Image (tube, grey):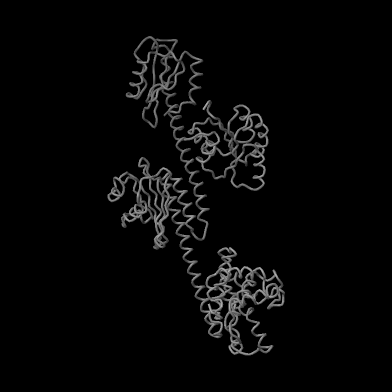
Amino acid sequence: MMDIVQYRDFLKSLSDISHWQFEIWDGGGPVFATAPDGPPAGERETLVSTIVTGNGFRVHPGTERFLAGAPLRHEGAPTGALLAWNNGAPNRTSADNVAMEPFLLRLTEILGEGLTTSTELNKMTTELSQSYEDIYLYGRLSSLIKTMHFSVHVLDDLIGEILEALHADLVFISLDNDKQMIMKFAPLFNRMADSDGFAKRLTAMVPVDSPSLKEHYFIVNESRLAPGYRELHADPYRTLLVTIQDGKKFYGWIGVVSFNVNHIFRRSELRLIVSIAEQVSVVITNTDLYNEMERFIVDMVKSLVQAIEAKDPYTRGHSERVAHYSMLLAEKMVFDKEQKTDLKWAAMLHDVGKIGITETILNKPGALTEDEYEQVKSHPTKGHSIMKPLAPLAGALPGILHHHERYDGKGYPDGLLGEKIPFLGRIIAVLDTFDAINTDRAYRKGSSVRKAMEILKSVAGSQLDARIVEIFTEIIASEECFREKEGTGEGRQ
Amino acid sequence: MDRRKRILVVDDEAPIRRVLELKLKNGGYDVFLAEDGEAALRVIESEKPDAVITDINMPRMDGKQLCKTTNPLKRERTFLTIIMTARIISEDEHWITTMKDTVFMEKPFSPSSILERIDQYFGVKR
């Protein structure tokens, strides 16, 4: 459609100061005239068709009024015409009628350029508009991907954004590792019984030797023309499939499906999905590395715990049990993931400093001398210095160092008072005390759970943080494992 | 629609004006453009737009000043003001809430969501 708005005023003023009137035609007919009373419609129509087919200036052979016209071209091809008629001089040879030929030719040239420019400008503005949409989308997506772990929730939001931005009917992410398939449909989409199976078959059908796979994608723009894909659905569709991979390591697919085959996937859409897949793979790789590091820490902590227990058989299982109780407590107190991890490590490793204390003291059945007791008391600081160089365990250090502080300030190593004692330290103090009473030691037999809890309550507020004792009491009351043990006198868990 | 709704786009960046102009025109709105707050005031006076989309950072008169100047006009004839800003800082958030019929949208913006927001204000369903 021709955009001639900006030339209307110009042609109008031209007709105001002369005997000339003008009319613009596009492929469909007249679109604008400076005066309603032009030459008969039939004459004008014939003239326009000779102009468009002849592709040049033409004069209508009639004599009533001088009527001439020249083609309007868009990108070289005539798509319409500019007509002019002279209400003053019918004579073909009059001076201004003769002058009209070069004038009309020049004017149509200018109009044509103007039309081309405005068409191009519209096209460019549309593209620019699309780029703005893309930038906006990239921004939203990258803020979603700015995370260490991918929860189902984040992936769900991610494909929701893609679905909307690409006007797709179906978007899915399938991750091979954990056999995950997450998908979303357009609101009105209701064409598929087994969408999971459909998505799986789409990716399974990708030819392994497809050259585009080197750039991590595969496109079918018209399923009816693609062997294999044609059979997957009765309705024609197009699909863009992008691999989530890091180097040679393959994690899964992002797939986009649309049943609107009048469009094809744009270059920018392809780029968008490929870059999302890249970012997803980075997150997955990081998560893998992180998990690997975590596994390494777990193994190391386990061997350290074994080393302590090898020296002191009576504490066998003690660290594991304290860690187990600490997780029950963390659950009850709604700790976040990081707090939980710190607490767990602190609980596992609170006695690690005993590695530096001789076995004869640790296993001595009778009372300790003052000097021996001083040595035992050094285990929190020893443990702290052993673990200090390990950055991932930094959050657990206060729990290791301060698990023998007392709420009334009479504990060690620093004699901290009340809330000044780090929270992890106060928690482990309660759990450590409970397990110590509950289980056999070198110097005495273990008490029942009920007895142990009575002792705990009697020192709440002095030795131990009363609030934590209270919460732990609730856990003891509700946990099945403690109830069964109760009354047996056998404290081992 | 009794008359086509009129939208004024105020931004000192020509490409943004162009993009919004095309998007809104294709959406069936009449569009007016201004490149700063001063020019916008003149258009608001003469064309009485039904909605104004404005940037904050502009030469001569900025978007904040434009809103403060036009807010009293809304007592007689209200219109929607959409403020587009790169990052909403709490200070902005405060003065925006004191303005009648004024919302903000983030930049970089999505032209189609601006159109959606305008449609929503006028109750247009597509």
Seen at 42% across and 61% down, the residue is A246
Picture mark count: 0
Quarter of the view holding residue A84: top left
Q: Is B37 left, or right, of A304 in this rendering?
A: right
Nearest to the observer: residue A198 or residue B88: A198
Compared to residue B7, the image places residue A83 above or below, namely above
- Residue B35: image location, x then y, percent: 59, 35
Would residue B60 be visible to someone looking at this image? no
Compared to residue A251, the image places residue B94 above or below, namely above
Compared to residue A384, the image places residue A279 above or below, namely above
Q: Is A380 left, or right, of A488 in this rendering?
A: right
Quarter of the view holding residue A360: bottom right
- Residue A125: image location, x then y, percent: 48, 38
Seen at 49% across and 14% down, the residue is A18
Would residue B122 be visible to someone looking at this image? yes
- Residue B70: image location, x then y, percent: 66, 33
